[in-house]
Image (spheres, helix red, strand yellow):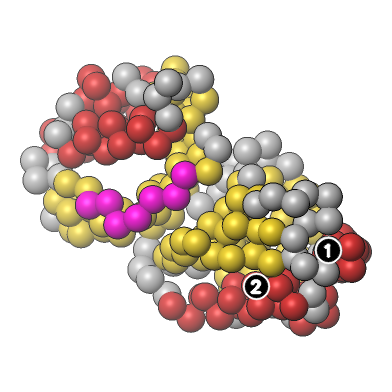
Amino acid sequence: MTSPSDIIEKQLEYYNNRDLDRFISLFSENVTVYTLPDFETPIMSGIDELSDKYKERFDSSPNLFSHLKSRISVGNFVIDDEDIEGLGGERVRIIAIYEVTDGKISRMWFIRGEEQIGKIDPVEGQLQAYNSGDIETFLTHYTPDCKLYDLQSGELRMEGHEPMRERYGDLFKDSPDLHAKVVERMFLDDYVLDNENVTGFRENEGVVEVVAINRVENGLISDVWFIR
């Protein structure tokens, strides 16, 4: 069975070869494409619009080539950190988040910008507080109205410090051996993406793999989208 990572690797190959037919064959008929931070309004919808957009791109950019810097694969999601050259004469850095459903790419989200290493600070701070079970220090790294979402469903899971204090406070008390280890980190523009292996859950003795997509504004985490 072809894995989501294999499908994204093929997609990258066809993109670099500017092979439109094979490239488009990897997408679902109802594919939607977004740019962060807007997770609700697509910039492209449907295979026809996608095909037209990429035909224009391939035709106008004969030297187009994407260099894969790193990749995260969790469940049916694949996240690529890419350095693209030959796009309108520019070199562009992006992070692309792909969702694969029934063997086809069904949704994509793009982050585009520059590396901002200072954005890592609150993400690293909350990680240390999480591993220490320190709920009050943990919350200081989030805006008072921070929103936590499930990326796949789009569901808003928590909003604000009080629900977070209750949820994470109980988690820290019930799971004193809780520990999150970052196995891959990507950061671009206002976003820091951590691929974590979490152990020590009271109700789960194994390793839980999570991706947290953190949006950092004015030195604090304002939004988080989770992939589990």
Mark 1 residue type: Ser
Question: Residue at horizontal 36%, vertical 30%?
Answer: 7
Q: In screen coordinates, is 88 left or right of 138? A: left
Between 68 and 177, the residue placed more toward the observer is 177
> Does the magenta stretch mainly form a helix, a strand or a loop?
strand
Question: How many numbered marks have been drawn onto this rendered protein structure?
Answer: 2
Mark 2 residue type: Leu
Between 103 and 220, the residue placed more toward the observer is 103
Quadrant in the picture for residue 62? top left
Secondary structure found at label 2: helix
Query: Which quadrant does the C terminus fall into?
Result: top right
Q: In screen coordinates, is 116 left or right of 210? A: left
Residue 169: image location, x then y, percent: 87, 68
Residue 175's label in the rendered image is 1
Q: Which residue is mark 2?
A: 127
Of labels 1 and 2, earlier in sequence is 2
Residue 6: image location, x then y, percent: 35, 32
Residue 187: image location, x then y, percent: 44, 66
Q: CA distance from mark 1 to mark 2?
A: 15 Å
Q: Which residues are magenta?
A: 67-73
Mark 1 is surrounded, within 10 Å at the Cα level, by few (under 14), some (14 to 19) or many (20 or more) other residues, namely some
Mark yes or no: residue 49 visible. no
